[in-house]
Image: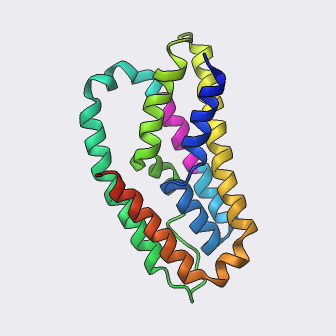
Amino acid sequence: MDITSFLIYCMIATFTPGPTNIVILSTVHNSGSKKAMKYTYGATIGFGLLLVISAMLNTMLITILPKIIMVMQIIGSCYMLYLAYQIYKMDISNRAVNHAATFMSGFLMQFFNPKVVLFTITVIPSFIMPYYIAIPAVTISIIAITLIGFLAFMTWVLFGTIFKKLLQKHKKTVNVMMALSLAYAAIMLWI
């Protein structure tokens, strides 16, 4: 296995902006890093579970892949547009806790996030299974990929924490930009 290509693919897929990372940044911005960590833990567990499902059901997924992608695009786009709307309409004068950023919402987001789903159904068959089929090797690979995902999520929490004052100074503008980013990601699923 070409470990360099594997790591580059994992880093690009997990560290680049996507729906989960944007929600994490928005949560830190509006509710603080403690609330964002709950969401991050849920997102990490969901991410890891998707990797396990991918490894276990890889051959079955290949035969029904086009149907899964279409359903994930529809559900994912709708969910991302809903999140964009929630971020946009967030009351900037109200300091109330963001109830959308829970462990469960972070967990569920992974199953409706096309970027994550496509990553998890490609990384295992492309980089792991051609070289390793033993359960311990696949398990170690899943743990390593999940750890990379967690580090990516933590980077966004840290980024939000470091730049929180700047982000809060321009709160409405930041919310609009994050909402537009999510809406753009949802629309790009269909182009």
Residue 51 at x, y percent in the picture: 50, 32
- Horizontal side of residue 133 vs 114, given as left or right: right
Task: Please identify the quadrant where the N terminus is shown.
Answer: top right
Tell me residue 182's x, y (percent). 44, 63
Please determine whether, in this image, residue 43 is positioned above or below residue 78. above
**Where is residue 163, by image quadrant?**
bottom right
Q: Nearer the viewer, residue 66 or 184?
A: 184
Is 33 on the left or on the right of 190, as rendered? right
Residue at position x 64%, y 67% from top? 28
What residue sits 64% from the left and 47% below the top? 152
Location of residue 146 in the rendering, given as x and y in whole percent from the top left corner: 61, 36
The spot of residue 138 in percent (x, y) is 57, 19
What residue range appears in magenta?
42-52
Is 44 part of what is drawn in magenta?
yes
Rendered view: 117 above or below 170: above
Q: Does the rendering let one see residue 102?
A: no
- Residue at the (62%, 34%) spot, across then down: 8
Magenta span dominant secondary structure:
helix
Note whether 107 is above or below 48 in the view shown.
Answer: below
Q: Quadrant of residue 183?
A: bottom left
Q: Could you tell me if residue 162 is visible in this image?
A: yes
Q: Of all residues shown, which one is farthest toward the right?
A: 162
Does 3 appear in magenta?
no
The colour scheme used here is rainbow
